[in-house]
Every structure is written in structure tokens, then in C-alpha cells.
Amino acid sequence: MQERYSPVELEPQAQARWAATGVFAATEDPTREKFYCLCMFPYPSGRLHMGHVRNYTIGDVIARYQRMQGKNVLHPMGWDAFGLPAENAAIENNVPPAQWTRSNINYMRGQLQRLGFSYDWARELATCDADYYRWEQWFFTQLYDRDLVYRKTAVVNWDPVDQTVLANEQVIDGRGWRSGALVERREIPQWFVRITAYADELLADLDGLEGWPEAVKTMQRNWIGRSEGLQIKFALSDGSGELEVYTTRPDTLLGVTYMAVAPEHPVARAAAERDPAIAEFLAACAQVSTSEAVVEKLEKRGMSLNLTVKHPLTGLPVPVWVANFVLMSYGTGAVMSVPGHDERDHEFAKLYGLPIKQVIRPADGSEVSVADAALVEKGLLCHSGEYDGLDFQRAFDAIAARLAGEARAERRVQYRLRDWLVSRQRYWGCPIPVLYDEAGTLVPEDAARLPVRLPEEVEWSGVSSPLARMPDFINATLPGSGAPARRETDTFDTFFESSWYYARFCCPDSEHAMVDERARYWMPVDIYIGGIEHAVLHLLYARFFHKLMRDAGLAVADEPFTRLLTQGMVCKETYFRESAAGKKTYYNPESVDVETDDKGRAITARLIADGQPVVIGAVEKMSKSKNNGVDPQTLIDRYGADTVRLYTMFAAPPEQSLEWSDSSVEGAYRFLRSLWRLTYEHVSRGAAPRVDVTSPALKTLRRKIHETIVKVTDDVSRRYKFNTAIAAVMELVNALGKTDAGSDEARTVLQEGLEVCTLLLAPIVPHCTEAMWAALGHDNALAVAPWPVVDPTALARDEVEVVVQVNGKKRANILLPVDAPETLARERAMADEQVARFLEGQTVRKVIVVPGRLVNIVVG
RNA sequence: GCCGGGAUGGCGGAAUUGGUAGACGCAGCGGACUCAAAAUCCGCCGCCGCAAGGUGUGGGGGUUCGAGUCCCCCUCCCGGCACCA
């Protein structure tokens, strides 16, 4: 063993050994219990960021721990390789997206290997490889045959200058991020997958996901948003048709004072044709991003359409308005407005002086006015004629029955969830395998002719999709007849690729099936680890896709992920400058110098390059768009992989968000160095003896060793709290370091203690522990060495420290026998000198004894 | 706006079932070693107070012998909101 801890030398050696022995290769073996540990695969953005390091270290710790438990562990890694950033890079650097992506993958693979993650690299996959996406195309044709996909128009953000569809992220304050042009809403034909057909199952199966965080399940339930209500038809007074609305509150029907429709609603469009002022209003509404977050934060605006509908109960006219906050993509794109009992309707009614009517009163008989605020809670009906006095359910039933009888309404279950829009008007994605014949009729591509390869040699201008300008791609023939046809130029949403990769890892080389029999052994994923930001979209799509695969007869069951560990965000301050046009340019923290006050708070920040100030923005998730990522490579180069892994796991528990500061990395390095030195000093004295331990101090040390095994095992396997596991080992190392190694007994305990530290830390810092393990006299591979076992006799203790409180305030600590009866605890507590001082002249009213913990004496 | 989460010393965090608030680490301060520095080692370290003691977990109220933890109200911050991944 070297005297000096030198990660730069020992880490590559350990990695070379792992590679040479193939310890991380996963092979199906029905005689062994499997464990499938998966981290969300990265987008190959160019370099690893701290979020990746955190995510993959958590996964690696769990995978390595499970291996030491004797499980057959599958721990794969791949690349979510299609997506928007590659197109942006192509425009900026004039590099084809494929080339940019593959070179990023190569660099990032090297970084992952440098960090010593225990992946089975033989299973690596990239979603931009035709071997992968061909199955996605095949699956799409299956879905087409099963009527689970369809075409329909949808509204997109259109950049009129760049002639391209913009992602919501690319719309900043209503303008295209590159062109600066005002964005227009535009309706174009799109592809949808019927996720709503699985809404009930996706909702119901959440109850069975015991290994998922409650917060994630709640968010998914709310996202699916199942509700029971009434779909009601309001006849237009001019006889031109009906306005359909959906409501979950038919009990408030008599409180309706106006109707509100979305700007894209046919009724609004028809009105705009008659009235230029309305047309102008609709045009203004069309210059807003399609993003719900943007729409819901808009100042509420509306306009009367100068038409009315007949109230289905009273027959009285109700005015129809168009409102900018009503979403066409929700329900019917129209709502009945009850300002007395809905906050948003109330606000709008106040703004435009529309009547507010109270039809619900509190069930407890109290008086409430709806003039200043809506009464949203359910209660009893009032001012509702024959329905007065009914509660919500009775009123619902009575009104539903009456309207159903007149064919003006029907009960409906509705979901907030909308069908999944999977087509993108982009180049760098998986081509949708569809053709159009000369008449424009749609023909799915034949399975035998797949894959439809995405051409990778591409000229890029940034204006419109390059696929649309590639005759070699577009001009095709129909399967069978060979008649001329035009190829679909839309590609899939990248969530399509990330919805099934976990299943493909079971059989990445399968040429005969999307997912083959090997998946029966490995699936489901035992633990899936990734960012909390994926709580709804990715995780819901993946659950849905999994059910689609199951129903297509593939080798998977109902749910893909048994346990879910949602990692908190790695956050960092943002720095930016804003142009006159409002365009923000973000600067990386490494290129900025921050001045702080004496309390460590940032006052000003300057760009190092020009010395001029930059704005200190909010602390946000490290991301490419905010350019606030901290490059882990610098730390790896300086301290080695083990220190980076240790620090990342020590800084915060996995589920908590972590505001990055690199100041305490030094401490992690110091700890590894002192553990190394302790081991070095120990092994330098020669092979350790093995004698009985009788000294009380050394017995206490042995107890500490075994208490640490208990603590770390619980933290790693049940709690996933690696920070406290590390703290416990640090305490043990501190105790070992203070032990005089002058006797055989002490050396026996030191050997045991160092072995335990090595084993407990092996999943977290696998490189240095491997060298230490060998130095401690072992020739087996640490990566698959058995996890330490607790010696129950070492844990035994005969005395325990108990806190004594007087009126809930701590006054003393006393030592009691472990099984001390309450009377003894009480006696000894009262007898304590310090306690007695506080009891003087007081009457003891009550004494609470919590065995083994505390005695609280209540006086007064 | 809606849905979900969070707030504890100068800083990251600990307190697992309502039972010692601040484990472990960073930074800081004092000392030892050294010609010196680095490294290392020893000690101190929430706030107020000489001390005894008081006080303290975003703010306000409540339940309890006892609340960081449970309940009600509020503030601020973070994530998601369907084309960032």
C-alpha cells in the first residue's frame, strides 16, 4: 500500500480491473434474485453536469450495494439522443445534429467511465440509432392498426420569420427567441396517441405503486384529473346551433350570468366575421404562446359577442363572451360562468360589470354575501326555485334528471388529461413511418420496410425543417403497389423514445423483437432514479407506453417501475444580461466574479471577460438554457472521482434540492485522505492479530463499529439517506483514529473497524476502498464482497443515558441500567443534584417517564 | 393562475414513531509543530449574558407534560403546467 492517497493513480487502476474482469456484466440467471437499478438516461448535451453526477452516483451506490447483497444486478446506461438542442447547435456551429450528438456521447461516456459507475456497457444504446428507433416505428404501426393513434389539428406557436414551430420554451414574452418576431398561434394537422383511453387504468394503478413518493402520485392523479359532471347544451338564441359546456357544478346552474368561450371557439370565430372589433380581439389573443402557464397568468380580457344563449332551465337569454383565459384544448372550449360561486368568473364579472347571483348558501345557516368574493364551497341551494334547500348531490341529480329528460344534458366523466400529441415539425427525431399517396390518403409504412432512416447528412439554415427540402427522403413508393408516394416529414416527440428504453435495456441486441423474453426476467425496474421535474410527463408517458406494450403482447407486466426515487434538483444562481429587446443572455457561474458582503451574501457580479456587471438572477435548476451548470470535470481532475462521489452524496439527501457550493468538497477529500492514512498506519504494523476483546473501552469501540453497520445498512437500503450514512462512518473513523494501536486487542478491533469502514463505503467510493481492501489482506473483489454482518453480542449495553427535564426543560443527563423500572428512573431523576435545585419549594404534579429516553417532572 | 414540494447557526445539513435542537462536514477563531508556509494535530464555535440562566427551527395562533415534527392562518422560495429534457 502506498503511503500517499493518490486518486489519479489508483482510480484508473481500479477501473481497468473492473473492465478486465467484467464484474458488472449482467447475465440472465433464473437461479439468482435479480435487481434492476436504473437512472434516467441523459440527453447528450456535451458535458456531464452536477445533476447527472448526483443522479448517477445515487444509482451506482444502490447498484453496488445490491451486488454486495448477492443480487444479480442490471445497471445499464444509454442516451436520450434526439432533441432540440442538437438542432440549435447545428445552426450555431454549422455541424450536423448527428455528428454533434455522437461526439457528445463519446465525450460523456468517457466522463461516466472516469467516475467509475458500474454499468454494463455492453447494453449501451442511443435512441438516434436506427436499431433502436426502428422498433418505435414498428410499434407506431401496431398502434395505428389498433386505432390508438389518430390525426387532428392542434394549435402551435408559429414563428412567421423563421417559418418554424416553436417550443414553449422558445417563446419569450410572446416573441420567437431567435427571430424576435411576434409569435402567432396556428392550427396544423398533428398526430395523437389515445392516452385518454387508458386514463382510468393509469389512475387506478397509482394506488398499487407503494414504492412511489406520495407527492408524485398526487401530481399524477391531479394531472389525469378525473371528474364527474354534466355536459350541457345551451341553445343559441338565433337558432344557429348549440353551445356545449361541461361543468362539475350543475348545482350552480341557476347562478349562470354569462357564458365564456375560447378565442379559437367556432362561435367566437363566427362572431369575428360579423364584427371587426371582435376579429381584432381574437387576433390579439392569437399572439400569445400556447403555454398554459402563460395564458393563466394573463390579465383577464374579454369581449361580448353580442349574442345570447337560452338558459336550459329558465329559458332566459344569457350573454356569450369571448375570454382570453378559456382554453380551447380543455373540454369543449366553452364554460358556463357562475360568478357567485367561482373565483375566476367572479373576477371577470367584476371587471366587466356582469351580474353576480347567489344560488348557494352555507349549510350551517350562516349569512354570506357573494358581492365581494365568490362562495366556492358546496352548500345548500337558494334563489333556485324548486331546487331551493337541496344539497350538492340532490341538486346535481335533480337537475341532471330534468335536463337529460329534455336531451339537453348528459352525465359525463371527464379527464383533464388530453391525448398525447406525438408529432413534431422538427428534423432531429425519429421519422413517423407514414406515407401519403398521390390523392393524399394516409398509408402506414410496411413493417418489412422499416426502419425509415433519418438522413444524417444535412444542410442547415435554421429556417423551416430540412426534411421538407430533401427530395430523396420525401419521394417514396407505397408498400405493395410501388406507386409514388410522399413521406411524412414530422418526427416523434422525444418522450416517445424515453417511454420504453428501460425495457429495451433487457435485450438491446434483439433483432427479432422490440422487447424479447429476457424482459420477463429483468422487468420491472426495481428502482428508477431521476429528477423530480419528471414527476408527471415522462413518468406518465412511460407508464402509459408500458401498458401499450403489454397489450401488444410484449414481455412486460402492468407497471414499469416498482420503486421511484425522485432526486431533488441541483440548483445554482443564474447570471444574465438583458438586451433592449428583452432578450436575456445567460453567463456561466465560472465566467462570473461575485463580490459578497461580510455575511457571505452576493452584492454584485461581474463578467470576468469584460469586468462589467451582470444581473444576479434567481437560484434555479442547473440547465443549459440558464447556463448555470457547474462543470464536474474540474473537480474530478483536481480531487478524483471518489471525492466528487463522496461530496455529492454527503451534501444533501437525494430527494432534497441542493444549492451547489463547491467550498466543502475539500472536506470530503480530507476525509478520504485521513481514512487512507489510518489504514496505511495500521497495515504498516504487519498482519493484525485476532484476540478476544475484554477491555471496556475497546468493547465500546466494537459496539460503535456494529452500531455503524446497523445505521448505514438502514440508511442505504431503506431510507436512501446517504448523507447520514457517510456521517456515521465519519464518526467511526474519528473514533478509530483516536484509538491507541499499542495492544493486540486494539489491533484486532482496528482491523475489524477498518474492514467495516471499507465495506460500508465501497458503494460510495469504490476506487480507494478497493485498494484499502487489498491492503487489509483480502484477495477477493470488493465490488462483489458480502456486505458486513452485525454481531448482536457486540451491540449489547447495560447502561443508557436518560434526559431529565423539569417542566419540559432539560436539566440533567443521568445513567440508568438498561431495564430500569419506572420507579427507579423517577427516583434517580429526583435525586440528581441539578434537578433537585429546580424542584426546591415546588409541588410535583406529574412525572412522565419515557423508558430509555427521558424523565419529565412537572411542577408548579 | 392551478398542482406538488420546501424554509433549522455564517454555510451544507442532522434530529427515522411528538421526547436532549444543531450529529457530521464547511467556513471562522485560538493554540501546538515549523526558519517559514503547506499539511497535520489539540481546543472553541446558535443568539443574549461575566455567570446563573434566558432564548432559539420563515411569521402569527392553537393542541400537548413536552412541538423543528401535529392542526389553522400567512409570507417567501423551488419544481411542473402538455413542443426543454
Image: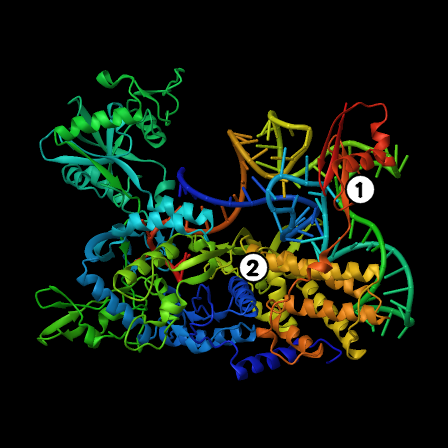
The image quadrant that residue A821 belongs to is top right
The residue lying toward the viewer, choosing from A366 and A732, is: A732
Q: Chain of mark 1?
A: A
The residue lying toward the viewer, choosing from B72 and A101, is: B72
Q: Residue A573 location, x and y as percent?
A: 56, 54
- Residue A651's tag is none
Q: Quadrant of the C terminus of chain A?
A: top right
Helix, strand or loop for disc 2: helix
- Residue A717's tag is 2
- The answer to whether residue A626 is left or right of residue A265 is right
Q: Residue B7 location, x and y as percent?
A: 60, 44
Please indicate, yes or no, whether residue A252 appears anywhere in the rendered image: no
User: Could you tell which of marks 1 and 2 lies nearer the N-terminus?
Assistant: 2
User: Same chain for the residues at labels 1 and 2, yes or no?
Assistant: yes
Helix, strand or loop for disc 1: strand
Q: Residue A54 location, x and y as percent?
A: 54, 62
The residue lying toward the viewer, choosing from A454 and A671, is: A671
Please indicate, yes or no, whether residue A617 appears anywhere in the rendered image: yes
Question: Residue type at mark 2?
Answer: Ser
- The answer to whether residue A678 is left or right of residue A551 is right
Rounded to the nearest whole Å, what is the CA distance between mark 1 and mark 2?
33 Å
Residue B60 lies, with reference to residue A504, above or below; the image says: above
Question: Residue type at mark 1?
Answer: Asn
> Which residue corresponds to the image point at 67% horizontal and 75% vertical from the top-left?
A773
Q: Which residue is mark 1?
A: A813
Residue A92 lies, with reference to residue A185, above or below; the image says: below
Q: Residue A22 location, x and y as percent?
A: 51, 81
